[in-house]
Image: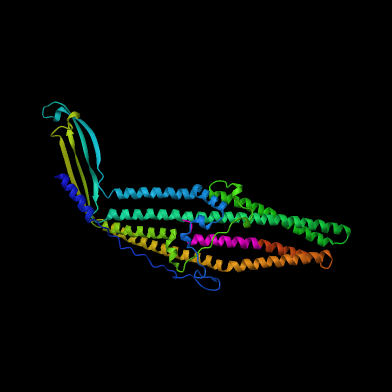
Amino acid sequence: MIRKSILLITLTAILTACTMAPTYKRPEAPVPASWPTGPAYKETDADRPGTAAADMDWREFYADGKLQKVIEVALANNRDLRVAALNIEKVRAAYQVQSAVLFPLPNAAGSLNEYRTPADISDKAEGTNVRMYNANVGISSWEIDFFGRIRSLRDSALEQFFATEHARRSLQITLIAEVANAYLTLAADRENLKLARSTLEAQEATYNMIKRRYELGSSSELDLNQARTRVEAARVDVARYTAYTAGDENALNLLVGTPVPADLTADSLDMIAAPRDVSAGLSSEVLLNRPDILQAESLLKAANANIGAARAAFFPMISLTTSIGTTSNELAGLFKAGAATWSFVPQVNVPIFNSVLLWANLEAAKATREIYVAQYEKAIQTAFREVADALARRGTIGDQLAAQQSLVDASANSYRLADARYTTGIDSYLTLLDAQRSLYAAQQGLINTRLAKLSNLVNLYRVLGGGQ
């Protein structure tokens, strides 16, 4: 009879339990439905068909084979990503704990109680020893979730688990982009170092030539000193870019989690296959699938479920403790007929005198939800701005690169003419010096602009949710 009663109560609780959490409704995205337009956005995605970033595997986007291998090593060894994966396991275990308490958890126990009754209080006027053996199987303080408090807490734990998984995916996207940018930066700085070294060699040759002319009386001391300043400036750049490349290598090794083999790196940007172009789509709704935004929404859902738990706390809490077992004064008699025992202890806890505390908890839960609403909206706004910036950069970097290349060509021609005029004595060394400076600066600018173009492709892929 008791077993049937327990089973009936359990089934009733499972079938009738509900939650008091508010019905979740996704907040409206506080950004325009379409991407910005204007002079900076010369090409729309209607004019530029392509695969959506979120649908393109990172191995497909990053076409360079060596870079792919470096990213694979980073995904296997990066410590931040490893911590994120372990956090998922931690939160999954917490969710399993919260789900388990929904159902009764039987436990078994055995005990031996032995005590002595003194002669002064014994009916037989003599001391007696009493020994009792017990063996029980039962349920201890199981809360029957009539009003959905535990289910709300379980739903909150589930959303927190989802948020942790989204956080790991977001971290993976960021890690892949950071590795790619570090890889590109190392190649660009190595190219700048090579340029600085070749410039130093050229300046030293010019200085030696002017020194010989000065010794012969055909060049002034001013020309000699100006040539020396260019040599020392070139030495400064060599030292600076030597330090930059070492720092770039250290940064890349940290991201990858292990030293990167030299044969997997590049000495110039020309040695790296450019990433593929991607489409941002025609609508900003693609942002809703970014892992960081999904993470913010999961945390919002968790806060929404916590309101249900706070509301359910106003209602009576029904718990049940029950056990079935045997008792005997002999160990061998535990399983004999007539030794059975049972207990059935339902308990109702009605919150009467702590309503102020419960109301405060409910108001705190509601305020927490509004905080997560604001954070969710801010995440969407930030994502929109990141994509808009990347699109603006994509729309203008082509013109900038073309202009920079033209500047290099013009500067090289000016330097050639200035060198010829100085050699024949038509112009002073100052004209040649200015031409050298302009050419060197233009060449550096070209390397940096090419790096900016490649980095913008990487960042556009990242902010559109590519690399999951």
| Residue ranking furthest to the right | 216
Identify the colour scheme used: rainbow
Q: Is residue 19 left or right of residue 264?
A: left
Give coordinates of residue 185: x percent, y percent. Answer: 60, 56
Whether residue 289 is visible to the viewer of this picture, yes or no, is yes
Give coordinates of residue 5: x percent, y percent. Answer: 16, 48
Q: Quadrant of residue 166?
A: bottom left
Q: Is residue 426 left or right of residue 453?
A: right
| Residue ranking furthest to the top | 126
Q: Nearer the viewer, residue 283 or 347?
A: 283
> Magenta region, mostly helix, strand or loop?
helix
Give coordinates of residue 164: x percent, y percent. Answer: 41, 53
Q: Is residue 440 magenta?
A: no
Is 397 drawn above or below residue 80 in the view shown? below
Q: Quadrant of residue 446?
A: bottom right
Give coordinates of residue 297: x percent, y percent. Answer: 39, 60
